[in-house]
Image (cartoon, rainbow, N blue to C red):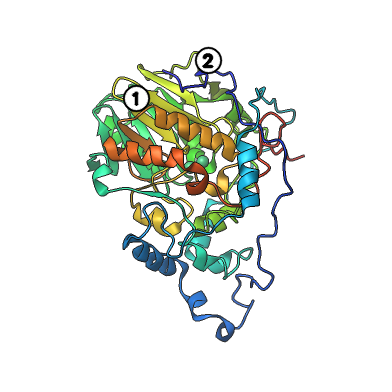
């Protein structure tokens, strides 16, 4: 099965044209914002709310929202009204003519960037370590995240064993810090009898290997690794694991420049989403990594190596070559970051993993038109269960209800009002999705 209106092979899907660009709104900062440094402003001059720890502020806001007033937004204030001009611009954008986009071919190579995950962790624990951001922005963290709330009954039944949650007899996932990895294969599948989907963040190699050993047996290596996309939180342990296990790594060709040392991702947008994770996003590594000869293209016929019954589906928008994996027989969807089940922009939500359905992580999504098309297509699959890149696995009617609600109202629920990529998406076709460092 392939996505409606979308080829399961390597052909680019019909895509929304983003002509008629309007001038971008880049004035995101209030003129009297204060830099987030201990010496930027005497403490006595700050508003009391600005002195609270951002996670505590967010927790309070989320508890208020949990009291429940509006079915789809968690804002404690009414959602901002968009101007008619803004709405007209968005309508024009989404009504644009479809266009085929050829694959972009990188034309230069450069060394892999050094990951800075330690800095991220340090900064997450100490907001003062992030001098680019403002105190005024942090209290907004919990007030702007958009989501479809879910009843806990929508959580897929899962038992935790060494941090591995079983979703079906032959599918499980493990949450490594802020991201999920998925294990495909029956328990005790043994050496080369299973497949790993995505590879978590750097520093998680030991936990990931322990989880695999708990499920498949000591020293059991996968037959291959499938990447949904190449963002840092999905490839962090990959160089270690590929070397340790000596396995091929499959990804969509449009992601290859980020994986063969050719190009970095476009810059994240810390101004969208409103959460601490968004604010810290400029610190995250953008690649590339270089997998060398281990890197392979996903089969053009839509099949998934060593995963019989599964097909890969191009689900661009969050990343140009993002893929979801779909098994028709039991309607199981591995959604990557096309939609997620926690507010990834929010450090508090990442910690608590409350079930909510969200669009892709805002700070890293570079083409909102394609992101919307992907969610609409995945919702049309009517999945019985879904594991996304972030947040708990979901199943049943509640999943489908929430997914359709997200698809139907994607622009309001998932797309930021303004940001770096809302009017000027980064695309593969014109090369703007690939940042080459000379
Ligand atoms: Zn991602
Ligand atoms: Zn992710």
* Label 2: element kind: loop
Give the vertical position of 38 relative to 294 (above or below): below
* Residue 171 seen: yes
The location of residue 273, given as percent across then percent down, is 52, 54
The location of residue 162, given as percent across then percent down, is 27, 43
Q: Does the numbered disc 2 mark a residue whose Cβ is under 8 Å from ligand 1? A: no
* Label 1: element kind: loop
The residue at 52%/44% (across/down) is 411
Looking at the rendered image, the quarter that the N terminus falls into is top left
Give the vertical position of 137 relative to 71 (above or below): below
Residue beneath disc 1: 194
Question: Is residue 77 rendered to the left or right of residue 424?
Answer: left
Residue beneath disc 2: 300
* Residue 214 seen: no
Looking at the rendered image, the quarter that the C terminus falls into is top right
Give the vertical position of 399 relative to 8 (above or below): below
Q: Residue furthest toward the right?
A: 438
Circle 2 Cα neighbour tier, 10 Å, few/some/many (<14 / 14–19 / ≥20): some
Numbered badge on residue 173: none
- Give residue 394's quadrant in the image: top left
Closer to the camera in the image, 211 or 409: 409
């Amino acid at each position: 099965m392939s996505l409606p209106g979308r080829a399961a092979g390597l052909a680019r899907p019909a895509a929304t044209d983003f002509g008629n660009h309007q001038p971008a709104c880049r004035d995101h900062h209030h003129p009297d914002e204060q830099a987030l440094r201990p010496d930027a402003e005497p403490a006595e001059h700050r508003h009391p709310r600005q002195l609270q720890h951002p996670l505590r502020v967010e927790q309070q806001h989320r508890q208020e929202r949990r009291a429940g007033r509006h079915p789809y937004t968690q804002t404690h204030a009414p959602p901002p009204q968009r101007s008619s001009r803004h709405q007209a611009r968005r309508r024009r954008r989404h009504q644009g003519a479809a266009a085929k986009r050829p694959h972009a071919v990188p034309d230069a190579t450069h060394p892999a960037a050094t990951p800075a995950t330690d800095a991220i962790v340090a900064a997450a624990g100490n907001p003062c370590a992030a001098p680019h951001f403002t105190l005024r922005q942090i209290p907004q963290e919990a007030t702007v995240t958009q989501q479809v709330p879910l009843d806990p009954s929508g959580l897929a039944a899962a038992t935790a064993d060494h941090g591995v949650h079983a979703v079906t007899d032959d599918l499980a996932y493990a949450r490594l810090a802020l991201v999920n990895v998925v294990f495909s294969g029956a328990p005790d599948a043994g050496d080369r009898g299973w497949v790993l989907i995505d590879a978590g963040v750097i520093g998680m190699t030991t936990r990931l290997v322990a989880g695999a050993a708990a499920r498949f047996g000591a020293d059991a290596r996968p037959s291959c690794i499938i990447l949904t996309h190449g963002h840092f939180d999905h490839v962090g342990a990959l160089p270690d694991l590929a070397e340790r296990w000596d396995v091929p790594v499959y990804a969509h060709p449009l992601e290859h420049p980020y994986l063969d040392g050719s190009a970095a991702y476009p810059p994240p947008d810390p101004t969208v989403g409103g959460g601490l994770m968004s604010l810290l996003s400029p610190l995250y590594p953008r690649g590339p990594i270089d997998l060398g000869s281990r890197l392979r293209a996903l089969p053009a016929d839509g099949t998934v190596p060593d995963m019989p019954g599964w097909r890969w589906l191009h689900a661009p928008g969050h990343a140009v070559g993002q893929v979801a994996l779909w098994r028709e027989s039991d309607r199981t969807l591995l959604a990557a970051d096309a939609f997620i089940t926690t507010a990834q922009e929010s450090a508090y939500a990442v910690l608590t993993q409350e079930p909510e359905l969200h669009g892709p992580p805002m700070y890293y999504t570079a083409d909102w038109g394609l992101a919307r098309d992907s969610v609409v297509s995945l919702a049309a699959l009517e999945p019985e269960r879904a594991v996304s890149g972030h947040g708990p696995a979901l199943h049943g009617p509640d999943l489908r209800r929430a997914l359709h609600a997200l698809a139907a109202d994607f622009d309001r629920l998932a797309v930021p009002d303004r940001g770096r990529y809302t009017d000027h998406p980064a695309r593969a076709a014109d090369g703007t999705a690939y940042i080459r460092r000379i």
